[in-house]
Each structure stands twice: as structure tokens, then as C-alpha cells.
Amino acid sequence: LLYNNQKMGKFILIDLKKREEKKKLRELCHEIVKDFSEWVRNYEVDDDTPPNEEECAALEEAKFEELKAAFEEQAQHLRRITTLVEMKTLDTYAALDMRRGYLYRRFADDVEELEEQAGRMLTHCVKTLETKVSEVSDMLPMTEAQIGEEMEQMKNVLAGWIETNFPDGVGGLDSYDDELPDGTPSYSEFLESVGAAEADLMEKNAAAIEAEVAEAKEEYSTMLKAKVNEAINKAVEEIIQDIHEDAQEEFDYLDEDARAELLETLAQEVKDYGASRLDE
């Protein structure tokens, strides 16, 4: 009888411990889901910008791993109900998985508003670049350094404007430029387009310099020819005038008609020689 009583007492003790472990398991399952919900509700951003959808997903995944590790650390000690632990673990993890997206849902309105603001600001950046390219194109040719300065100044002005008007400035904008209207580039893509526009301006500038030099050569060539021709004509006139002034003394042995005929011949020779040196 004593043996049977002892045996019965042992069974009762084991049953009580199982009940305690089942209770502990229920509490663990409840706590892990509760902890996640409280984490979502109390999550605070480190700056002025809430996490975007991708960042929320990454934060949730890290929190899931943390909670699962804590759950498994405590559940491994419930050795009398291992089968039940396995079943409840799957159910609990499924309950957690159903809560994916809760963190982003909390910030969704703020995120969408910032994404819209990012879209508007990047659209302004694109228009500013188009205007700058047009302005610089009208100023060509110029030095490559001047082109670089114009583009760098534009980027600095835009970056300063973003720093002033978007939460966390350029870094914040970069977190909200993944979901933009069609045709609107992200900030990194915008910077790439600035580089491409600058390279294109450099090519146009090289062509403009070549054309400008060719035009200048032609203009100066025409001007120099005109100056030389003018000097030749002036010299011809002066020589003919000198011949006429010296004719009376130089050709005093000729009568007036002969002297006039000689002067006419000499003048024509001077004119012909001058004309042969003219560049039409």
C-alpha cells in the first residue's frame, strides 16, 4: 500500500510539473506576440524621418529573430512537453509572421507624404538641370573648367536646398526616392544624369571651339587681305603721285606730249604690278 501511494504521488508530481510547463509555454507564446506588438507601438525613430517600407521590413525581421531566440532559449527547458512545444512554436511563429508589415503600417501615411515630397523635389532638380544645360549651351564655347564650375555650383545649390527643406537632407531624401512617379529619377540617378549632361556639354564645347576657331581664322584672313590690299592700293597711288611730281625734273628732255605718254605708261605699270599683288 505504501509503495502504491508513493507511486501515485510521483505520478501526481509529474502531472503537476507538466501543467506548470504547459502554463509556462502558454505564457511564452503570448509574451512573444505581445512583445512584438508593444515594440511596434513604442518604436521611436532616431531622426526626423520614419523608416520606409524596405527599412521597416528589415527592422521587423531583426526583431523577429531576437524574439524567436529568446523564446527558444526559454522553451528548451520545457522537456516534459517537447511535442507540444514544437507545435506551439510553429503556431507562435505563424502568428508573428501574420504581423509582418505592422511597423510600416504605423508610419505609412508619413512615409507616403515624404515620398510625394521627394518626388516633387527631384522633379525640380531635373528641371533645374535642364535649365542649366540650356544656359551653358548658349554660352559655349568656354573652358572645360568653367563648365565644371557651372555644374558643381548647380549641384551645391540643390544640395543646400534639399538639406534645408527635406528631413535629414540629402541622406533622408535618399531613403524615400525608391517609389517615385514614372520618369522621376532617384537622387543617385539624378547625380548620374548630371555627370552625363556635363560630359555631353564637354563634347559640344569641343565642337563649338573648333567651329569658333575656324570662323575666327576666316574672319582674320579676310580682314588681313583687305588691309594688305588697302596698303598696296595706297602705295600705288603714292608712287604714281611721286612720278608725276618728279616728272618735270626727271624728264625735262622730253616734250610735254612725250612726257605725258611716258607718265601714263609708268603709272599703268605700277597699277598692273600692284594689281598682281592684290589678294582677291
Image (tube, rainbow, N blue to C red):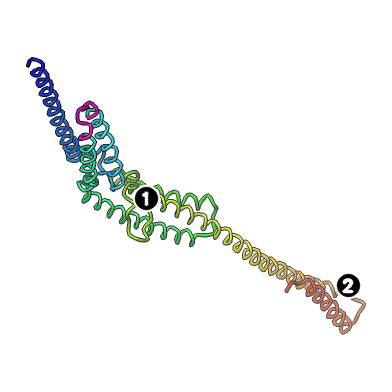
Report the residue at 24% width, 34% height from top. Answer: 67
- How crowded pointer 1 is (Cα within 10 Å; few <14, some 14-19, many 20+) is rated as some
- The residue beneath circle 2 is 250
Q: Residue 68 location, x and y as percent?
A: 26, 34
Q: Secondary structure at mark 2?
A: helix
Report the residue at 25% width, 42% height from top. Answer: 48
Residue 158's disc is 1
**Which comes before the other along the chain, label 1 or label 2?**
1
* Side of 38 where 258 appears, left or right: right
Q: Please provide the residue range marked out in magenta.
A: 75-84
Q: Is residue 277 magenta?
A: no
Image position of 215 with respect to 189: above or below: below
Residue 190's disc is none
Q: Residue 8 location, x and y as percent?
A: 10, 21
- Give the amino acid type for the residue marked by disc 1 in the picture: Leu
Q: Nearer the viewer, residue 218 or 85?
A: 85
Report the residue at 42% width, 60% height from top. Answer: 130
Give the farthest residue toward the front.
1
Locate the N terminus and report the quarter of the image it occupies. Answer: top left
Q: Is residue 83 magenta?
A: yes
Q: Nearer the viewer, residue 203 or 238?
A: 203
Q: Residue 20 location, x and y as percent?
A: 13, 27
Q: Residue 182 location, x and y as percent?
A: 35, 61
Mark 1 vs 2: CB contact within 8 A? no
- How crowded pointer 2 is (Cα within 10 Å; few <14, some 14-19, many 20+) is rated as few
Image position of 51 with respect to 118: above or below: above
Q: Nearer the viewer, residue 152 or 237?
A: 152
- Give the amino acid type for the residue marked by disc 2 in the picture: Glu
Q: Main secondary structure of the magenta part?
A: helix
Give the distance between the C-alpha atoms of the residues marked 1 and 2, in whole angstroms: 84 Å
Q: Quadrant of residue 100?
A: top left
